[in-house]
């Protein structure tokens, strides 16, 4: 169950919230962490305060670095390529970021998350590139620790060569190039690891039409599965509580730079 707030693929009804003061309830969230480009926290539900919701937000889509190696809000994203030791304290994102041309010198970068992120009924949601929309219910798939999925496209006989693919973020649509020169037929698949995604295969190049297969957590550790025709594109959606902009979901693999808040380590 996902709640991409740009292009919703969510089986429950969605609620548009009335305008509020951003950041007003962000201070109520706890258990902050930044993992593999995702911001994670546990926040109280406004409608039912005893209920605590763990959710995630793809921070690497909307935060980048300026020329001074400081965090800025940007649709280009990509801060995670240059920063480590990321954590949140008192609503402020902290990280050590490499200075451009500085011979691997790092500086501390900070960013007030409340500028474009708030707690909406327990869910971390950004309004930087889109209007906030909130799901009516929380997913029963927990927010993962590593946000990873690893799978293979392969020949129908499951013999090498394979095409290994590893992602830590959603993918709107990824077409596959002609791989005949490698011997990969793209008509078989194996899933070695899935932390919480729905993986869809298509025989079209644009992820349109009837999918060849929709694969979820139940398909993890299945190997040498044969499809009726060749995979020409794929899409990937989180099943856990996840806020992201699908128009920016290019599926670039992310690396970790995580740390809990000092008061919670």
Image (cartoon, rainbow, N blue to C red):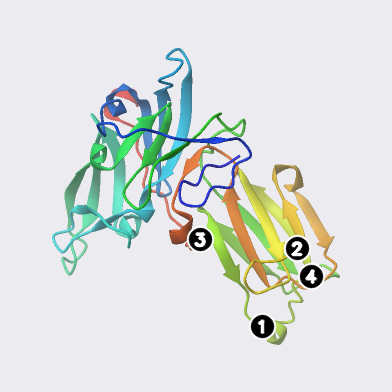
Q: Mark 1, residues whose alpha carbon is within 10 Å: few (<14), some, or many (≥20)?
A: few
Q: Nearer the viewer, residue 251 or 99?
A: 251
Q: Which circle's residue, 3 or 4, is located before the other in the chain?
A: 4
> Given this view, does label 2 or label 4 mark the residue nearer the observer?
2
Relative to 129, say whether 242 is above or below.
above
In the picture of the structure, the residue carrying the numbered disc 2 is: 210
Q: Residue furthest top?
A: 50
- The residue at which mark 1 appears reads as 178
Task: Tell me which numbered mark, 3 or 1, is placed earlier along the sequence.
Answer: 1
Q: Is residue 133 above or below residue 43?
A: below
In x, y percent, where is residue 231? 73, 70
Verify CB contact (< 8 Å) between mark 3 and mark 4.
no
In the picture, measured across the screen, residue 63 lies left or right of residue 251, that is left
Q: Nearer the viewer, residue 55 or 159?
A: 55
Q: In the figure, is residue 146 to the left or right of 94?
A: right
Residue at the disc numbered 4:
187
Q: Quadrant of the C terminus?
A: top left
Q: CA distance from mark 1 to mark 4?
A: 13 Å
State the separation of the CA atoms marked 3 and 2. Answer: 22 Å
Q: Secondary structure at mark 2?
A: loop
Residue appearing at x 69%, y 87% in the figure: 181
Q: Vertically, is 69 above or below 143?
A: below
- Residue nearest the viewer, comparing 95 with 39: 39
Label disc, if present, on residue 241 of the rendered structure = none
Q: Quadrant of the N terminus?
A: top right
At numbered mark 4, what does the secondary structure look like: helix, strand or loop?
A: loop
**Percent of width and height locating residue 246:** 48, 56
Q: Mark 1: which secondary structure?
A: loop
Q: Position of residue 187 (x, y in %)?
A: 79, 70
Q: Is residue 141 left or right of residue 255?
A: right
Residue drawn at x 55%, y 29% is 138
Q: Which circle marks residue 251 in the picture? A: 3
């Amino acid at each position: 169950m996902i709640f991409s707030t740009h292009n919703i693929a969510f089986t429950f009804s969605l609620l548009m919230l009335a305008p509020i003061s951003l950041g007003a309830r962000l201070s109520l969230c706890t258990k902050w962490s930044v993992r593999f480009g995702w911001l994670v926290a546990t926040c109280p539900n406004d409608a039912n305060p005893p209920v605590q919701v763990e959710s995630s937000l793809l921070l690497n889509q909307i935060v980048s670095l300026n020329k001074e190696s400081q965090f800025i809000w940007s649709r280009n994203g990509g801060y995670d390529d240059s920063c480590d030791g990321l954590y949140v304290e008192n609503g402020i994102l902290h990280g050590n970021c490499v200075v451009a041309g500085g011979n691997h010198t790092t500086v501390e970068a900070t960013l007030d998350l409340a500028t474009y992120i708030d707690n909406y009924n327990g869910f971390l949601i950004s309004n930087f590139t889109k209007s906030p929309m909130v799901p009516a219910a929380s997913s029963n798939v927990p927010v993962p620790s590593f946000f990873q999925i690893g799978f293979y496209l392969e020949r129908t006989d499951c013999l090498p060569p394979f095409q290994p693919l590893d992602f830590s973020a959603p993918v709107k649509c990824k077409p596959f190039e002609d791989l005949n020169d490698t011997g990969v037929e793209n008509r078989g698949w194996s899933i070695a690891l899935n932390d919480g995604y729905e993986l869809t295969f298509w025989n079209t190049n644009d992820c349109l039409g009837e999918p060849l297969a929709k694969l979820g957590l139940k398909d993890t550790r299945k190997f040498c599965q044969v499809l009726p025709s060749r995979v020409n594109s794929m899409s990937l959606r989180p099943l856990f509580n996840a806020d992201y902009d699908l128009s920016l979901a290019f599926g670039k693999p992310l690396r970790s730079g995580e740390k809990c808040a000092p008061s919670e380590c």
